[in-house]
Amino acid sequence: MTTEPLVEALLAVSRSMVALAARNLSALGADVTLPQYRTLVLLAGGGPQRSAVLAKELGVAPSTLTRMCDRLVRKSLVQRFHRYNDRRSIWLGLTPEGRDLVGVVMGARRREIEAIVRAGILHATDADLALLHAFVRAAGELPDEEWWRNWRISADPVDGAQPMHPSRNGGPFTGLRAPAH
């Protein structure tokens, strides 16, 4: 059995999902790039992370992540901190504004995907859904319910955290409310 048709279909779905994310970010006036948004999504789903681990997960050099996070810190979407028991490692976590931005964009994406499914009168069998869930897990992502559970607590205070420096200017992301999941 050839995997080519499935790979091609998943590539097309991937392009569609990236396009949806870009459209939603633009429509909401979110001043973040797709790589910055991906960083926020990883922090929302996985919680605070050491910068070296996050750089590896994003497939970027640590210096690239540092510059990207400098911008996200200035926008009050991400915070840097040390843990009291490990002053050498730099940790990154979402601010409430960063969590809310991710929630708003994800909520908009969900509504748009739901509209596409309804308009196209698309149906999925249990086997189709199992395949999609298996793909999500194989790609290292979380199922939607688990991701939202983590999102809800992603900007909660971290035990043993010591901010590296006060929040920088740039102004927090405001004007939108995150969905109540």
Image (tube, rainbow, N blue to C red):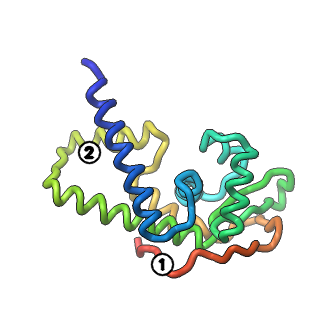
Relative to the observer, which residue lies in front, 51 or 146?
51
Write down the residue under mark 1: 176
Q: Residues within 10 Å of mark 1 (few under 14, many from 20)?
A: some
Along the polypeptide, which appears first: circle 1 or circle 2? 2
- The residue beneath circle 2 is 129
Kind of residue indicated by mark 1: Leu
| Residue at x 16% of width, y 59% of height | 119
**Quick one: SS at disc 1?**
loop
Q: Determine the residue located farthest toward the top in the rendered image.
A: 1
> Which of the 4 quarters of the picture holds residue 75?
bottom right
Q: Secondary structure at mark 2?
A: helix
Q: Quadrant of the C terminus?
A: bottom left
Q: Where residue 58 sits: x, y (%)?
A: 60, 44
Horizontal and vertical percent for residue 149?
47, 63
Q: Residues within 10 Å of mark 2 (few under 14, many from 20)?
A: few
Which three-letter amino acid code belongs to the residue tagged 2?
Leu
Residues marked 1 and 2 touching at CB (< 8 Å): no
Is residue 153 something one can see in this rendering?
no
Which circle, 1 or 2, is nearer the viewer?
1
Give percent across and percent down for residue 49: 67, 53
Tell me if 162 is positioned left or right of 139 in this view: right
Residue 180, picture quadrant: bottom left
Image quarter where the N terminus lies is: top left
Above or below residue 72? Residue 16 is above
**Residue 99 horizontal/vertical position (percent):** 55, 68
Frontmost residue, 162 versus 56: 56
The CA distance from mark 1 to mark 2 is: 32 Å
Q: Residue at 61% across / 42% down in the picture?
A: 57
